[in-house]
Image: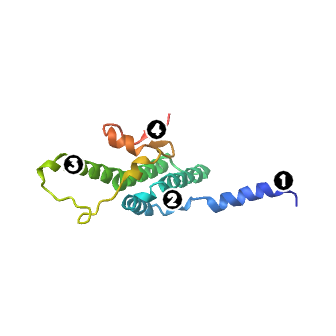
Amino acid sequence: MAAHCLLPDTICRLHQVCACEFLFWNRVLLPSYFAEVYQNPTRARGLQYMMMAIGDIRLMVDRCLNYSATLVQDFEKEVSQALTDNIIAPLGRDIETDLRLHIHSHLKLDDRNPFHVGLVDRTPLLEILPLHFFNHTVDIKSLLLFDSLPPFSPVS
């Protein structure tokens, strides 16, 4: 068989294997995944791929004949709430706590010994590129620096 005949079939099969629409039906796993990434910041780069996988859901919904716009909006809110509750808010609290302890370290109130208190380097969570899903962009570092901004800004 000629190579030009195999290419469309290969692309179709590759799309079938890599499609992540199942996340829509298993979205209860997203908060657990985000919490796991927060507990293990070395896995932060995987957030980019998870958000791309969530983007596959939009393709599935767009192919449906009878769907309401609220279905997509509700799912977007659910994902953004899970991301905020499990990564952004705890990261902000941890940074604030560490800054307060550092500022008041001259008072010698608490022994912040890393052998007694488990310190985790959360830097990888701040170093990841902005996350894109549906028509939103989430830049974790900017959100924590400028917390007066809305948590999710639409892509212009």
| Of the image marks 3 and 4, the number of the one nearer the N terminus | 3
Q: CA distance from mark 1 to mark 4?
A: 40 Å
- Name the residue beneath numbered marker 3: 102
Q: CA distance from mark 1 to mark 2?
A: 34 Å
Q: Residues within 10 Å of mark 3 (few under 14, many from 20)?
A: few
Q: Are marks 3 and 4 in contact (CB under 8 Å)?
A: no
Q: Residues within 10 Å of mark 1 (few under 14, many from 20)?
A: few
| Of the image marks 3 and 1, the number of the one nearer the N terminus | 1
Q: CA distance from mark 3 to mark 4?
A: 36 Å
Q: Position of residue 23 (x, y in %)?
A: 51, 60
Amino acid at the residue labelled 2: Phe
What label sits on residue 24 in the rendered view? 2
Q: CA distance from mark 3 to mark 1?
A: 63 Å
Amino acid at the residue labelled 4: Pro
- Name the residue beneath numbered marker 4: 154
Q: In this rendering, would 12 be left or right of 90?
A: right
